[in-house]
Amino acid sequence: MRCEWVDSDLDMIDYHDKEWGKPVYDVQKLFEMLCLEGMQAGLSWKTVLKKRDFYRQAFYDFDIEKVAMMHEKQIDHLMQNKNLIRNRLKLLSIINNARAWQQLSQKQSMVDALWQFVDHKTQVGDYAVYHDIPSATHVSKSMSIWLKKNGFKFVGEVICYAFMQAVGMVNNHTRKCYLYHCKA
């Protein structure tokens, strides 16, 4: 049995089984997931997951240096792409966040900076059902405040908590899920 949020969609099953809750320490993957979680604002993860490959194509596989060099005319072009969520502010936030990421990277490792919020180890949840899992925590609020202070967009506390779960900073597989006993 899997977590209740997983439906019969094969992409969702694959994401749950192979990615969600598994620790990520790769800079580019962390950047990608932070951006994609921002795209999810007001939508379902399934919607974003179905478009993930198109985002990778549009944003140079989330290569931070290349994304930071993008300009508004490219966003005009991407706004015509039906395979993306055509929200101008969300698309612009990816470029903005790449630039903010670059700035912070000059001072510190972004992997360390993000993982510091969980003392560099996965926080393990213990929930009977998915609906018991909070949408945000004091830790995700702290991360959100820090990211916003450093110029990031679409990084509210709910988005940050979803990000933390996605990259294994928080592992919230529920007790009924077969991956519950495989926690970090």
Image (cartoon, grey):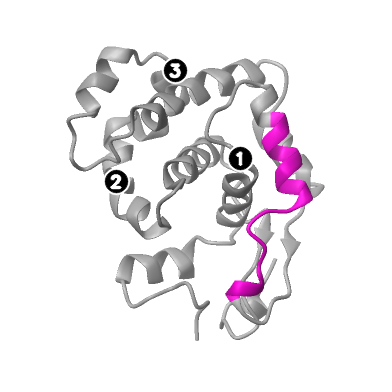
Specify which label sits upstream in the sequence, 3 or 2.
Answer: 2
Q: Nearer the viewer, residue 143 or 15?
A: 143
Circle 1/circle 3 CB separation < 8 Å = no
Q: Pinpoint residue 134: horizontal percent, then vertical percent.
A: 67, 63
Report how far apart the C-alphas of labels 1 and 2 lie in the structure.
24 Å
Amino acid type, label 3: Ala
Q: Which element type, helix, strand or loop, lies under badge 1?
A: loop
The secondary structure type at the circle numbered 3 is: helix
* x and y percentages locating residue 21 in the rendered image: 59, 62
Vertical position of residue 133 compared to residue 152: above or below = below
Instruction: Residue type at mark 1: give it.
Output: Gly
- Cβ–Cβ below 8 Å for labels 3 and 2? no
Q: Residue 47 sits in which quadrant?
A: bottom left
Residue assigned mark 2 = 53
Q: Main secondary structure of the magenta part?
A: helix
Q: According to the image, label 1 marks what residue? A: 156
The residue segment tinted magenta is 130-146
Viewer-nearest residue: 86 or 116 = 86
Residue 68's tag is 3
| Inter-mark Cα distance, 3 to 2 | 19 Å
Residue 84, image x and y in percent?
26, 40
Task: Inspect the image, locate mark 2, and give the three-letter code of the amino acid beneath it.
Answer: Asp
Query: Which circle marks residue 126 in the picture?
Result: none
Locate residue 143 relative to residue 99 in the image: left or right. Answer: right
Q: What is the x, y in percent for residue 132?
A: 66, 73
**CA–CA distance in space, label 1 to label 3:** 21 Å
Judge from the rendering whether residue 111 lies leftward or rightward of residue 78; answer left or right: right
Q: Is residue 114 magenta-colored?
A: no
Viewer-nearest of discs 1 and 3? 1
